[in-house]
Image: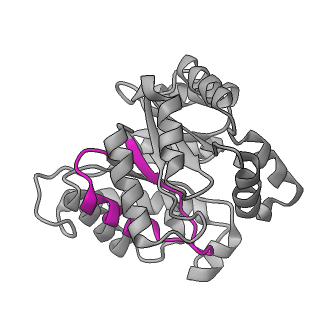
Amino acid sequence: MDTGVALPSVVEIASGRELTGWARSAEELGFSTLSVVDRLVWPGYESLTALAAAAAVTERIRLATQVLIAAARADVGVLAKQAASVHRLSHGRLSLGVAAGVRRDDYELTGTGFHDRGRRLDETLATLRRLWEAGRVAPESDGATPEILIGGRSEAALTRMARFGDGTVVVGPPPAFAQRARRALEVWAEHGREGRPRLIAQTYFALGDDAREAARDHVGSYYAFAGPHAGRFVDATLTTERAVREAVEGYRKAGCDELVLIPCTSRPEQLQLLAAVVKEEL
């Protein structure tokens, strides 16, 4: 199982230098992927812009949106161009993860419909594939296009993965991941896809003396839209070395191909603390 880490692009207000420093360190420490969490109505960096900055200072590590709220991007042509550009600038390292999302404010900001977002996401994915394959928007390249990953908790999201994607992104503890992964494999086969989808898990972490406080401050604020349910996300955050180790083992046993850990703070020592715990995975 590969082990990746997210950029702190929506955590606190990290400077550009801190963000690129994190990217360099993640690659040097051996993490497999550098991902970004996407949200528009939030004081953080735009996802593909942040990955472009990371691409400029790294050479090997995979870059991923996990996941981009693609249906809230009104202009699919611009999105196709942006993703193709990051893919080319990074020498083919971009994985474009997308989902419909659950926050109305992101859609209100861009003037896009919320209730029909699933249908429009399907249309967006079909258009992205068509534009990339036609070579109309991508920089001159060898024809390679970004891997597409599909997030979301619904059955429709798994159907979307089987129709348009190369894998799925699951947020949840190992037992929930295992159940979702089994269904993803079933839906993949039902649609006549060969091979198997890539199965990716995400979870939040914070380590050190103030780990619980960091989890409460960031995760609690980020999921405040969920009301009283926000506390469940805080409680699920990995805040001890033991919790991280148990999660790694649990996801591995559940058939996870890659676990991506999302930081609750942009302090650079978090990377070193995490790497020390998961060193056997790197």
Could you tell whether 55 is left or right of 42 in the image? left
Kindly indicate the quadrant of the structure image that contains residue 205.
Answer: top right
Find residue 171 and report its horizontal and vertical position in percent. 62, 42
Is residue 1 visible to the viewer in this orientation of the structure?
A: no
Could you tell whether 229 is left or right of 169 in the image? right
Find residue 87 and report its horizontal and vertical position in percent. 26, 57
Q: Residue at x 46, y 25 (%)?
A: 189
Could you tell whether 69 is left or right of 174 in the image? left
Residue 181 lies in the magenta-colored region? no
Q: Residue at x 44, y 43 (%)?
A: 163
Find residue 268 and report its horizontal and vertical position in percent. 49, 54
- Outermost front residue: 209
Is residue 263 visible to the viewer in this orientation of the structure?
A: yes
Q: Is residue 199 above or below residue 230?
A: above
Could you tell whether 138 is left or right of 25 in the image? left
* Figure quadrant of the N terminus: top left
Asked whether 218 or 98 is in front, the reply is: 218
Asked whether 132 or 43 is in front, the reply is: 43
Kindly indicate the quadrant of the structure image that contains residue 13.
Answer: bottom right
Residue 48 lies in the magenta-colored region? yes
* Figure quadrant of the C terminus: top left
Query: Bounds of the magenta span?
Result: 33-61
Kindly indicate the quadrant of the structure image that contains residue 241.
Answer: top right
Asked whether 171 or 186 is in front, the reply is: 171
